[in-house]
Amino acid sequence: MYKTQTMFRFLRFISNIKSSTLIIRPHQRCYSVHGEEIPATHAWNLSNDGGDISCLGSYTEGSGIILGVYTSEKTSNIVCLTKTATVFNHNINGRLIDALKVTPLPRLGEVRVYPKLDPTFDVVAIAGLGRNGAGYNKREGRDEAKENVRKAVGAGVIKLQAMKVNKIYVEGFDDPESAAEGAHLAVWQNHHLLSNTKRKVKMPDLILYGDCDMKKWRIGLEKAEAQNFARKLMETPANMMTPRALAYTIVQTLCKTNVNVTLRSERWLQENNMNAFLENTKGSPQGPILVQLNYNGCDPGIPPVVLIGKGLTFNSGGLCLKKCEEMKHMRGDMAGAAVIVAAFKAMAALGLPINVVGLLAIGENMPGGTAGRPKDIVKSLSGKSILVSPRDFSGNLMLADTLCFAQSFNPKYIVSVATLTKEVRTAFGLSASGLFTKNEKLWQLLKIAAIHSGDRVWKCPLWRMYEREIKDFTSSDLSTLQRDEFYPRGISCTTTAFLNQFTCHKNWAHIDTSGTMYEGGRTSYLKKGMSGRPTRTLIEFLGQMAYPPDLEDGKISSDTVKQDACG
């Protein structure tokens, strides 16, 4: 049912329930329940008619517009405009084509700016979309048509934002969802701690132009807004984003939606024998917190999907202190918790019909007189004893007890997200997150979600040889270090194999985001800083769970939809 070669033909699908069937249409999808339209989103207070947005491309007062042009290395002298750009060029008597003829055509991610080309707009930006007809690229592991739209729109928005444009009209590029993602991700700036006088970059209004599909535009805005929220949490310095402050922010954000938030204190952790969790946070005066999020989008009796996030608001390494260079980005070591909170925020706004539980292990790993020591042995919630490594492997202890606790929800799937090992960053750089799982169906779901979002994942092995490395000890059941502690090998795989000892079934996947936590500025729609990845991948994954396609005949009964989406 979930064969990869067939799934790629269904990049987007929209559900229309008529009598007892759900019709699947390629290249479209909306998040709706029983055919009902989604309401105006929580992040943007737009009216149902779109305000000053028109399907015909009319406007009230605009300052800048972003249009697209396709380019090819073989046909660099041929101008191939998008549909909306073609209509725009016709309305201004061909002046757009005339302007493009006297300048080099913009390649993918490049922008050409033409002021006063049209009397209504102060500036017209033409963004390069790369080759026409791009699609899923198996070698690159993503849908390049969607990614090219994000890159083009992102580059255009950043260019106009630097010119202090107040309103930016963005054409739909035949994919309003990707256009909205690229635009809203690019416009975000980390200046929430600056005074108003110091904020040099203005946040312009983003308006869809020349496209009627407001539903997909709003879905894209919600996804991008969720990722921007995760970026804001990750960028906040550790002295302000303490465990208590993070828990308070989660309560303030999600309690405005239909997500239930439960906070488990340090005393609760002690009473429930979560000693491995506590071992990580003993050196900090800030007590640890286990945050439980509950979202019920369908029958509460249906098994949920459980999302687990590591939330170390700062990771100094404890007594095994990191080097100063290694600590410069450790304010973002709570990336796993941040992206899961953001995914819940978007999920509630989109109203996905699915049950999801979130477990966020929040704390702070600091050196101190009470900090955990190398070679200590602690007993986890599962009853297994753990020998603590003399190296810095902090997150796996927190996640071990949290994974045990997750079994109590009888979950359909468990997905944990954490910045766990720097070796993943060494292997993949900023290009992909490492994904570990033994469940082929779950791997395909996450892989396809990553293809749509552009935030790539790469499957890494969980072979038995890695389990032997953390099992064969005489003093304890398990260890966070390998037997050959002086010449460790395959650290990412052995660390995840350690976590695998605390799951009772194979429906578990772990995403290591150490490499994708930080963005170096090479992605045209993300400014330099914390990336907020893989927020949109998680939202897309949950969307697939909520609205799975039947790949046999293109139709699926409403009863099967409910069973697959929620069960």
Image: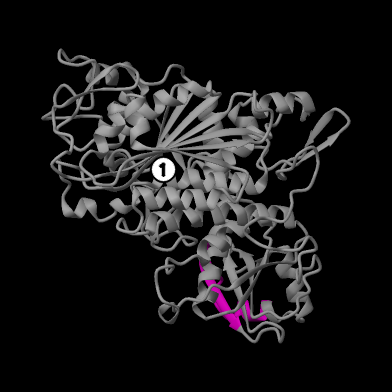
Name above or below for residue 72 compared with residue 475. Answer: below
Which residue is farthest right? Answer: 19
Instruction: Give the x, y percent position of residue 43.
Output: 62, 58
* Residue 327, image x, y percentages: 23, 52
Q: Quadrant of the C terminus?
A: top right
Q: Is residue 101 magenta?
A: yes
Mark 1: secondary structure? helix
Q: Is residue 45 rendered to the left or right of residue 284?
A: right
Q: Nearer the viewer, residue 19 or 250?
A: 250
Q: Is residue 521 visible?
A: yes
**Colour scheme of this structure image?**
one colour
Q: Quadrant of residue 8?
A: top right
Q: Point out residue 140 in the picture as x, y percentages from the top left corner.
A: 48, 43
Residue pointed to by mark 1: 336
- Mark 1 neighbour density, 10 Å: few (under 14) some (14–19) many (20 or more): many
Q: Quadrant of residue 64?
A: bottom right
Instruction: Provide residue 14's location: percent of width, then percent of height.
Output: 75, 42
Residue at the location (66% across, 84% down)? 117
Q: Residue at x 61, y 26 (%)?
A: 3
Q: Residue furthest left?
A: 486
Residue 221 shown left or right of residue 398 in the figure: right
Magenta stretch in the rendered image: 97-114
Amino acid on which the number 1 mark rests in the picture: Gly
Say which of 26 and 445 sits in front.
445
Q: Residue at x 48, y 40 (%)?
A: 139
Up-down relation of residue 538 to residue 20 (above or below): below
334 within the magenta span: no
Q: Is residue 207 left or right of residue 24?
A: left
Left or right of 513 in this view: 99: right
Where the N terminus falls, by quadrant?
top right
